[in-house]
Image (cartoon, rainbow, N blue to C red):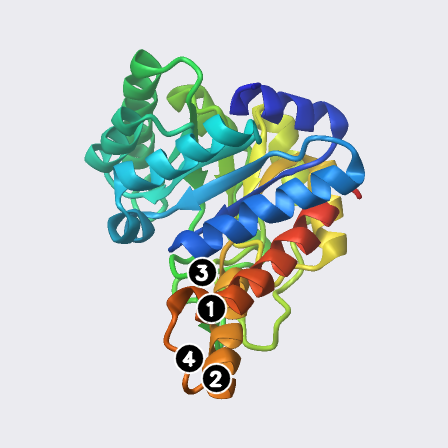
């Protein structure tokens, strides 16, 4: 099987994006891998996916346990499924994920000064590369919030007007000084999803400018709530990985609420959870069609 690095390189050439879907439980895992497998079968080609687990999600599932889950599934099926340590806020937590054998890791220093973000990100890159030359290390520049949830307004501290977005010259300096493989900039995106279901439009021109400046693949965080057209334009402008989380959580909760309301006597968890898996799988399938131009 090709490495995640090789799939990212392919995506750059093909002008498509790899879907990154966060999970908090086994239901999210099955929804993601089944969607990719079934869509790939229909399309007649391999569709890689990235399973994302933030610090909180890793704490809930288990750092090594989720790695074992993905590894055993890939070994049995040969499907192209990769594991990313999403939003990691300290070197120690990055080291933990690297040592566990993750395919990728993100150091999120967006609430720090530029200088501190560079220093710690560089330290993470150096450690990761000594352990595994194929691991991808992502850095972030520009604060877009932290929580994957339904929002009544733009998150506190997030400013999406043009003057507050990641600047190409700072992005280039950051990439040069840290040596990251991937960069997640602030380009009008936000973590979470506005209650109306539609987030503000992305700044496609800024994505293009950053991509031209840094010459490495870009990652779009906060993909829940963005339009299909924004995704397509962002991919054409240089985005190669797109994160989705909140929409999956909403699909899970809404399906679970309906199931419990309609089946008050059911006590078997696997029966209760089946509709939630299907609901999340629909979301993943919809996104993968857009990202892969199917």
- Percent position of residue 154, x then y: 49, 69
Are dots 4 and 3 in contact, CB under 8 Å? no
Sequence-first tag of 3 and 2 = 3
Are dots 3 and 2 in contact, CB under 8 Å? no
Tell me the residue that label 3 is attached to: 158
Residue drawn at the location 75% of the way across and 27% of the way down? 14
Tell me the residue that label 4 is attached to: 266
Question: For the residues marked 4 and 1, what is the alpha-carbon distance in whole angstroms?
Answer: 8 Å
Sequence-first tag of 4 and 3 = 3
- Mark 1: secondary structure: helix
Tell me the residue that label 2 is attached to: 263
Query: Which of the pair 31/210 is nearer the observer?
Result: 31
Which quadrant is the N terminus positioned in? Answer: top right
Q: In the image, which is nearer the foreground, mark 4 or mark 3?
A: 4
Residue drawn at the location 38% of the way across and 57% of the way down? 146
Are dots 4 and 2 in contact, CB under 8 Å? yes
Residue drawn at the location 47% of the way across and 54% of the way down? 28
Q: Can residue 77 be seen here?
A: yes
Q: Residues within 10 Å of mark 4 (few under 14, many from 20)?
A: few
Sequence-first tag of 1 and 2 = 2
Tell me the residue that label 1 is attached to: 271
Are dots 4 and 1 in contact, CB under 8 Å? yes
- Percent position of residue 11, x then y: 67, 28
Q: Would residue 118 appear left or right of 230 to someone viewing this image?
A: left
Check the image and report above or below for 199 versus 141: below
Question: For the residues marked 1 and 3, what is the alpha-carbon distance in whole angstroms?
Answer: 40 Å
- Mark 4: secondary structure: loop
Query: Which of the pair 109/6 is nearer the observer?
Result: 6
Are dots 1 and 2 in contact, CB under 8 Å? yes
């Amino acid at each position: 099987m090709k490495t995640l690095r090789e799939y990212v390189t392919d995506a750059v050439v093909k002008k498509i994006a790899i879907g990154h879907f966060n999970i908090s439980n086994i239901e999210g895992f099955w929804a993601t891998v089944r969607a990719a497998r079934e869509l790939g079968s229909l399309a007649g080609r391999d569709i890689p996916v990235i399973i994302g687990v933030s610090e909180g999600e890793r704490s809930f599932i288990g750092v090594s346990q989720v790695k074992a889950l993905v590894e055993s599934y890939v070994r049995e099926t040969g499907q192209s499924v990769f594991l990313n340590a999403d939003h990691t806020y300290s070197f120690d937590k990055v080291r933990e994920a690297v040592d566990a054998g993750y395919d990728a890791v993100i150091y999120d220093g967006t609430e720090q000064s530029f200088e501190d973000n560079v220093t710690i990100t560089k330290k993470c890159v150096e450690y990761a590369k000594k352990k595994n030359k194929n691991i991808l290390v992502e850095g972030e520049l520009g604060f877009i919030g932290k929580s994957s949830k339904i929002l009544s307004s733009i998150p506190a501290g997030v400013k999406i007007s043009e003057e507050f977005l990641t600047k190409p010259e700072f992005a280039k300096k950051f990439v040069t000084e840290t040596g990251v493989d991937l960069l997640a900039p602030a380009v009008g995106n936000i973590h979470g999803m506005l209650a109306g279901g539609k987030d503000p439009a992305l700044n496609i021109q800024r994505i293009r400018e950053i991509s031209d400046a840094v010459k490495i693949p870009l990652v779009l965080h906060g993909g829940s709530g963005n339009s299909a057209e924004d995704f397509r334009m962002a991919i054409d402008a240089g985005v190669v990985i797109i994160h989705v989380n909140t929409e999956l959580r909403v699909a899970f909760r809404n399906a679970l609420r309906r199931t419990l309301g309609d089946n008050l006597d059911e006590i078997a968890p696997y029966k209760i959870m089946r509709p939630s898996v299907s609901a999340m799988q629909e979301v993943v399938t919809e996104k993968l069609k857009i990202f892969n131009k199917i």
